[in-house]
Amino acid sequence: MYDKVTIKMTKKQRAQIVQEELEKLYPEVPIPLEHKDVYTLMVAVALSAQTTDKKVNQITPKLFAVADTPEKMAKLSFEEIRELIKEIGLTNSKAKNLKKMAEVLVEKYNSVVPQTYEELEGLAGVGHKTASVVMSQGFGFPAFPVDTHIHRLMTQWKLTSGKNVAETERDAKNLWDESVWNKLHLQIIFYGREYSPARGNKERDFIPKLLFPEKV
């Protein structure tokens, strides 16, 4: 247990405590989105925008049963894709993006998912966060994808100003060594879901009590 006499900690000290506590809780962290390769991971992450991973995992088995490669996805019509993913939000735009993404992968990349941020972010439906997940969890490059859980928690922990996700990502990369980025961003997501949901859970949310003992 950390000494409650310590009133003011530096960001680095708070970041170290966060890392140590999350490693105790989640020594192993599976990727929340079900997939079988880099392409299906990218599709799943693109579908997860403004919906839950749980919901995405409910619909992707049906989608991947008929379109688990860019070639198969490109051959489906917009209407067919939309029908397969109709249970999640933003269905029309996501269906259009999946079809266009697949067509570009087939035509430009020989159906192989590219391994640079520039190329990934040039694909329909792939923003920086999706590209970061693909680079980190798909290809193993150091990356720190920032989702709403991470942005919210790092702001609460006063590890970032919380102005925007780009700043949060930059602060995270400055606070932690790149060797832990790929695992730590998942650990923070898991902590947010289990211990500190957006609606709050003061009983379980113990990390702020360690970081700011003067407020306890």
Image (cartoon, rainbow, N blue to C red):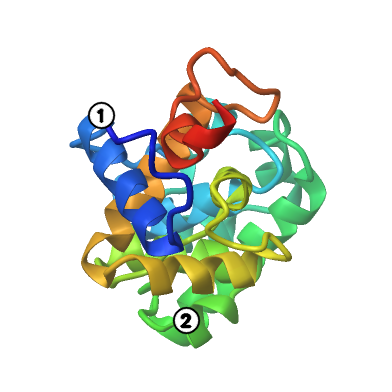
Between tags 1 and 2, which lies in front? 1
Expressed as whole percent of the image width and height from the top left, the position of residue 140 reads: 24, 66
Name the disc covering residue 117, or none.
2
Expressed as whole percent of the image width and height from the top left, the position of residue 78 reads: 73, 53
Within-10-Å neighbours for mark 2: few <14, some 14–19, many 20+: some
Q: Nearer the viewer, residue 168 or 83?
A: 168
Q: Is residue 205 above or below residue 43?
A: above
Q: Earlier in the sequence, mark 1 or mark 2?
A: 1
Instruction: Give the residue drawn at x 53%, y 56%.
Output: 73
Amino acid type of the residue that numbered disc 1 sits on in the rendered structure: Met
Name the disc covering residue 37, or none.
none
Within-10-Å neighbours for mark 1: few <14, some 14–19, many 20+: few
Q: What is the secondary structure assignment of the residue under circle 1?
A: loop
Expressed as whole percent of the image width and height from the top left, the position of residue 176 reads: 33, 65
Q: Nearer the viewer, residue 22 or 211?
A: 211
Q: Is residue 195 above or below residue 215?
A: above
Instruction: Give the residue drawn at x 39%, y 67%.
Output: 175
Instruction: Find disc 1 in the rendering and name its residue.
Output: 1
Q: Is residue 55 left or right of residue 36?
A: right
Q: Nearer the viewer, residue 100 or 119?
A: 119
Instruction: Give the residue drawn at x 51%, y 87%.
Output: 118
Examine the rendering and report whether any part of residue 35 can be seen: no
Amino acid type of the residue that numbered disc 2 sits on in the rendered structure: Tyr
